[in-house]
């Protein structure tokens, strides 16, 4: 998979992309990340990438010319019919694991990092195929959001993780029907008088699976109840939530 990142501060990506899973994915030739400086596609001596907004107002707006020219240079000679060009903006739709799964299936992806007060609307309308936000807050620029997206996508590229099962039961994954992950424990079995639930030490895999399913549902009901609207629960599973509510009251 190839990911091209259009930004103003490409050096921000140097350390994050040379660590951990992303580094291993690159070394295994499973992922190719190319960062581009938008300033390199300006045509004045000052490499001007922004200008004052028409109609007045605070801040500066990123100009369309260098962004379009850079994206078109990347696209030259490449099949662009289905290539996602994602603009990272707080106005975009909220990033979800489903979006990450869909993007991870693409062989080539372009990410555009916004900055300053915003980007000329013509980039929104005529270049970006999608607009994504990593949360309902505002960052100084899209570089950090791009790092988040690349990390999440990389984990789902086949062969990147040590085991294909590793991501199966993550929170928000298909393996958990999009719910939160169950509690996890490791050695020692007892630490500061806090013990691992006995069921996890029983060796009974069927009962362990049932316990984990129950914990996943209860944890979701407690921490992110709105997520339960996207799954169909059995009568027994609904009773777990009711019992928890009664016990808490």
Image: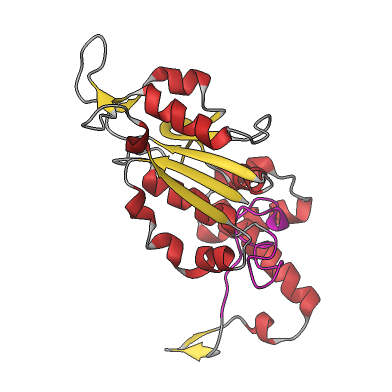
In reply to whether residue 184 is colored magenta, the answer given is: yes
Report the coloring of the rendering: secondary structure
Q: State the image coordinates of residue 81 (x, y, percent, origin top left).
A: 68, 29
Determine the residue positioned at 49% across, 18% down.
Answer: 125
Prevalent SS, magenta region = loop
Q: Toward the viewer: 81 or 130?
A: 81
Q: State the image coordinates of residue 76 (x, y, percent, origin top left).
A: 58, 33
Q: State the image coordinates of residue 24 (x, y, percent, origin top left).
A: 55, 69
Q: State the image coordinates of residue 11 (x, y, percent, origin top left).
A: 33, 53
**Residue 131 in view (yes/no):** no
Q: Toward the viewer: 229 or 169?
A: 169
Determine the residue positioned at 72% across, 86% down.
Answer: 202
Question: Can you name the residue that lies furthest to the right here?
Answer: 206
Q: Toward the viewer: 158 or 209?
A: 158
Measured along the vertical axis of the image, is residue 141 above or below residue 118? below
Q: Quadrant of residue 138?
A: top left
Left or right: 192, with 86 as reference point: left
Left or right: 43, with 243 as reference point: left
Label tally: 0
In reply to whether residue 205 is colored magenta, the answer given is: no
Q: Toward the viewer: 232 or 119?
A: 119
Determine the residue positioned at 65% across, 62% down.
Answer: 167
Give the residues in magenta: 158-185
Measured along the vertical axis of the image, is residue 235 above or below residue 58? below
Q: Quadrant of residue 241?
A: bottom right
Determine the residue positioned at 63% across, 60% down.
Answer: 30
**Residue 149 in view (yes/no):** yes
């Amino acid at each position: 998979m190839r990911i091209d990142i259009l930004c103003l501060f490409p050096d921000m990506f140097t350390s994050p992309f040379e660590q951990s899973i992303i580094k291993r994915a690159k070394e295994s030739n499973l992922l190719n990340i190319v960062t581009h400086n938008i300033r390199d596609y300006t045509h004045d001596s000052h490499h001007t990438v922004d200008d004052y907004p028409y109609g007045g107002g605070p801040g500066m707006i990123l100009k369309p010319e260098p962004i379009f020219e850079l994206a078109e240079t990347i696209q030259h000679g490449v099949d662009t019919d289905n290539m996602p060009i994602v603009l990272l903006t707080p106005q975009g739709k909220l990033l979800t694991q489903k979006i990450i799964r869909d993007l991870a299936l693409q062989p080539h992806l372009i990410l555009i990092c916004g900055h300053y007060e915003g980007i000329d609307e013509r980039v929104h309308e005529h270049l970006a195929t999608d607009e994504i936000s990593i949360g309902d807050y505002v960052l100084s620029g899209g570089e950090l959001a791009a790092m988040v997206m690349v990390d999440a996508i990389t984990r789902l590229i086949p062969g990147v993780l040590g085991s294909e099962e590793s991501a199966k039961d993550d929170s928000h994954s298909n393996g958990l029907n999009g719910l939160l992950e169950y509690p996890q424990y490791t050695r020692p079995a007892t630490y500061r008088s806090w013990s691992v639930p006995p069921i996890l030490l029983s060796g009974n895999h069927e009962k362990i699976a049932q316990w984990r399913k129950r914990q996943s549902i209860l944890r979701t009901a407690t921490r992110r109840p709105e997520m339960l609207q996207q799954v169909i629960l059995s009568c027994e599973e609904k009773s777990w939530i009711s019992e928890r509510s009664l016990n808490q009251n």
